[in-house]
Amino acid sequence: MSDDGRKAFGPLLRRTGYSHVAKAAVQETTLCIKEMHAAIADQSFDVLRRIPLLSWPAQIVQAAHEAISAGVYAAIFHGSGALLDVAAILERQHPSPDKPPGRFASGLHSALNGAFGDHLAASNNRLAINMAIRVNGKVVPLDTDALRSAFPGAGRRLCVFVHGLGCDEHCWEWGDPSEAAATYASHIGCQVQTEWACTPLYLRYNSGLPIAENCAQLAVLLDNLLAVWPQPASELLIIGHSMGGLIALGACDQAMALGMSWPQSTRMVICLGSPHLGSPLERLGQLATVGLKLTTITRPLGNIAAKRSQGIKDLRRGPGAPRTLSKPHTIAFRFLGASLTEDVEHPISEFLGDGLVPLSSAIAHEITGDVQCARLGKLGHLRMLNDTRVHRQIREWLGVLGAPAEC
């Protein structure tokens, strides 16, 4: 963001609500268009000023053009700001009901955090998501009574589902529950509960924050969770999709380095389509951003592109292939990668990957011990959330766990 932009609407980002975020976006876009307009006009008038007979008239026209355009952009900037300020007042006077927002509103909220979540958090905007376990969209406090109330059938084995970039816990319910195959998440949630005496818990977090920051938050959350879980001597499983797998692995690493106890209670970590070696799409986005900044005309667009969240930028190279953890452990690690091609052995399979993550990036690791990888063809990045083959693979991996340990 330019200095002028920060001065013009930076304070808006410190306010709360969707209307103020919309105001900041509209006014930033207005400044961007104004900057591009000025760059194009300057080049045109510069040519005219070099022609002897047109130099003086061109200067007069340019002055008039600048005065008119400045008035138009000022009207748009301040007019849109005034309208959205009114919307913000109405928003405060008509607070949302006590029930959580629906799936669409929740998804939009999470997508906003994926794109600009670090900016929302840094400006203390109430739209910034705080990492928490949720049930039916509501935050479950980490105390024994609240957990016992939210999970009346709480057992000694927990399975924490960690979503990917720009998503929330509803992504595990993707699909039509009325279909014969059932949705992957609700079905696997029931399966882990019935077949492996496991209580499913769904995490929501701000995926726009730096990955390392989310890893640290998850490490603390899991430590606190197991400390107050209604059943003692509990075991933990973690299933992460995309960025969620990276955060799960990073949380294990940080927890061990800090001497936390929950990794010793963790039986298995499953990563579905996680870009350990980075995502080519974000690398392409970075190249496009650099390219847009090369000319004065497109530089404003480059400045906007550069404001995508740090969480997205961290996917450029990824955290690297997971390494053996710093201390002895009994965690089983499972990695699943996918390709859009039916034949995962085909040379183009690696290039295409699942459309977002290459095969090698999803299954790369340097971990010794109990590690298994699987590859599936004709499968896209998001489709793996409700693919029956993924479900079967997870069932196979979890099948070796047996019943949870008794006290």
Image (cartoon, helix red, strand yellow):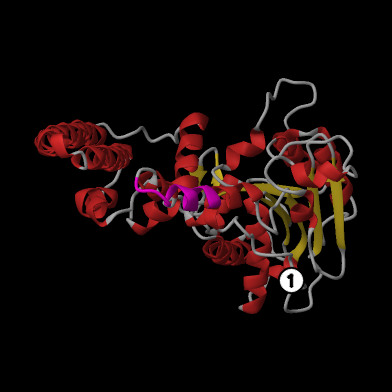
**Quarter holding the C terminus?**
bottom right
User: Which residue does the image show at 68% across and 63% down from the upper left?
Assistant: 249
Q: Nearer the viewer, residue 36 or 253?
A: 36
Is residue 133 visible to us here? no
| Residue 37 colored in magenta in the image | no
Question: Dot 1, crowdedness within 10 Å: few (<14), some or many (≥20)?
Answer: some
Q: Position of residue 314 (x, y in %)?
A: 56, 58
Residue type indicated by callout 1 = Gln
Residue placed under numbered mark 1 in the picture: 264
Q: Position of residue 3 (x, y in %)?
A: 25, 57
Residue 303 sits above or below residue 106 on the image: below
| Magenta span main SS | helix
Q: Nearer the viewer, residue 340 or 220?
A: 340
Residue 91 sits above or below residue 228 on the image: above
Residue 63 falls left or right of residue 195: left
User: Which residue does the image show at 15% across and 33% down from the upper left?
Assistant: 65
Q: Which secondary structure, mark 1?
A: helix
Q: Position of residue 339 (x, y in %)?
A: 79, 41
Q: Which quadrant of the figure has residue 262?
A: bottom right
Residue 161 sits above or below residue 184 on the image: below
Is residue 45 visible to us here? yes
Q: Nearer the viewer, residue 223 or 2?
A: 2
Tell me the magenta residue range: 287-296
